[in-house]
Image (tube, rainbow, N blue to C red):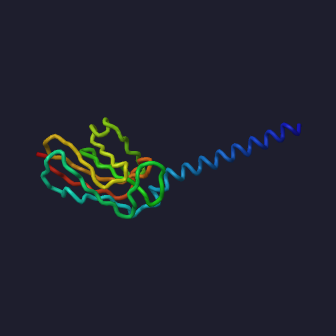
Amino acid sequence: MTRITALFAVLILALAACADDAAEEAEAVVYSVDAQPDAAASFVSPSDGDTVTSPFTVELAAEGVELAPAGEPAVGEGHQHVMVDIGCYDSGESIPGPSDTDEAAGRFHLGDGSDSREIDLEPGTYELCVQLADGIHQAFGSTETITVTVE
């Protein structure tokens, strides 16, 4: 009976440790979304209404957060995405990608923590939205939307 009691106690301790790990992981997933309410992404260039030649470079800015590569989420860090003709995601939603398929669908990822990248689009008029995401691509912060014409 003593062995069964000891085994049961060890099992209870192991389950409690797993529950603590799961709770820490859940906090890590949500904290950047909730802990950075003043974070904002914006366009430096092009400007709203500009006409550009493809490929063109988007230059972006971030306030209230330090740009960092995607990976382990950390409070005060994020990376940017540019969405083309699909709008931005609600805070807390996961932004798909990065992949060639996602770029073809209009989601351009700056997962290396950079603040600019080249985008290649066919001629036409497009709505671009810039958005921050934490290390695991959960959207947060204020966004900016502009319209550009590609010649």
From this viewpoint, which residue is outermost toward the top? 101
Furthest residue in direction right, as rendered: 1
**Residue 100 occupies quadrant:** top left
Q: Is residue 19 left or right of residue 75?
A: right
Is residue 58 found left or right of 64 in the rendered image?
left
Q: Residue at x 25, y 56 (%)?
A: 59
Of the pair 36 and 70, the residue shown nearer to us? 70
Camera-side residue of 71 and 139: 71
Q: Quadrant of the C terminus?
A: top left
Q: What percent of the width, then of the height, locates residue 85?
A: 24, 45
Q: Position of residue 135 (x, y in %)?
A: 44, 50
For residue 36, above or below residue 136: below
Q: Position of residue 29 (x, y in %)?
A: 50, 50
Place of residue 120 in the rendered image (x, y in percent of width and height, measured from the top left)? 21, 43
Q: Camera-side residue: 125 or 118?
A: 118
**Above/below status of 48 relative to 106:** below
Residue drawn at x 89%, y 37% is 1
Looking at the image, residue 123 lies above or below residue 115? above
Q: Residue at 24% across / 53% down in the picture?
A: 58
Farthest residue in the left direction? 151
Q: Residue at x 38, y 57 (%)?
A: 67
- Check the image and report above or below for 46 versus 17: below
How many numbered discs sit on the rendered protein? 0
